[in-house]
Image (spheres, helix red, strand yellow):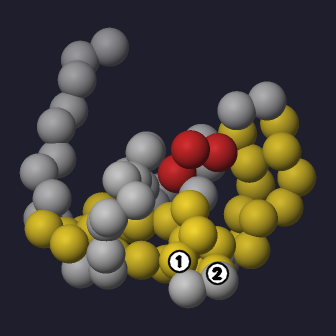
Amino acid sequence: MPVSSITQRDGHSVVFAVEGDRAKAKTVTPQQTYGDLRLVEGLGSGIKVVKEPPAEMKDNAKITVVTTKQ
């Protein structure tokens, strides 16, 4: 998981999982860091997350998913 995806909300480490057009706050337990990636406990594999959530983002926030071709 990108380190930039992990943020603090109410004293907990969370990431915002993309669920349709909403960002759902998911509590995680950060583990080891590898460069700009960090292992976390608390999420299943294949979850899409908000890469750099803004400080004002709240649970269930409406989002627009933008995809880029690589």
The three-letter amino acid code for the residue at tag 2 is: His
Callout 2: helix, strand or loop? Answer: strand
Which quarter of the rendering shows the C terminus?
top left
As drawn, the label of residue 9 is 1
Residue 35 appearing in the image:
yes
Residue 11 locus on image (x, y percent): 65, 83
Residue 57 locus on image (x, y percent): 31, 66
Q: Residues within 10 Å of mark 2 (few under 14, many from 20)?
A: few
Towards the viewer: 20 or 15? 15
Residue located 32% across and 80% down the image = 59
Residue located 42% across and 77% down the image = 25
For label 2, the residue is 12
Q: In the shown orientation, is residue 60 left or right of residue 14?
A: left
Q: Quadrant of residue 37?
A: top right
Q: In the shown orientation, is residue 23 left or right of residue 39?
A: left
Instruction: Verify CB contact (< 8 Å) between mark 2 and mark 1.
Output: yes
Q: In the shown orientation, is residue 17 left or right of residue 37?
A: left
Q: In the shown orientation, is residue 22 left or right of residue 3?
A: left
Q: Quadrant of residue 10?
A: bottom right
Residue located 52% across and 51% down the image = 5
The three-letter amino acid code for the residue at tag 1 is: Arg
Q: Residues within 10 Å of mark 1 (few under 14, many from 20)?
A: some
Residue at the extreme top of the image, as rendered: 70
Disc count in the image?
A: 2
Distance, label 2 to label 1, CA atoms, is 5 Å
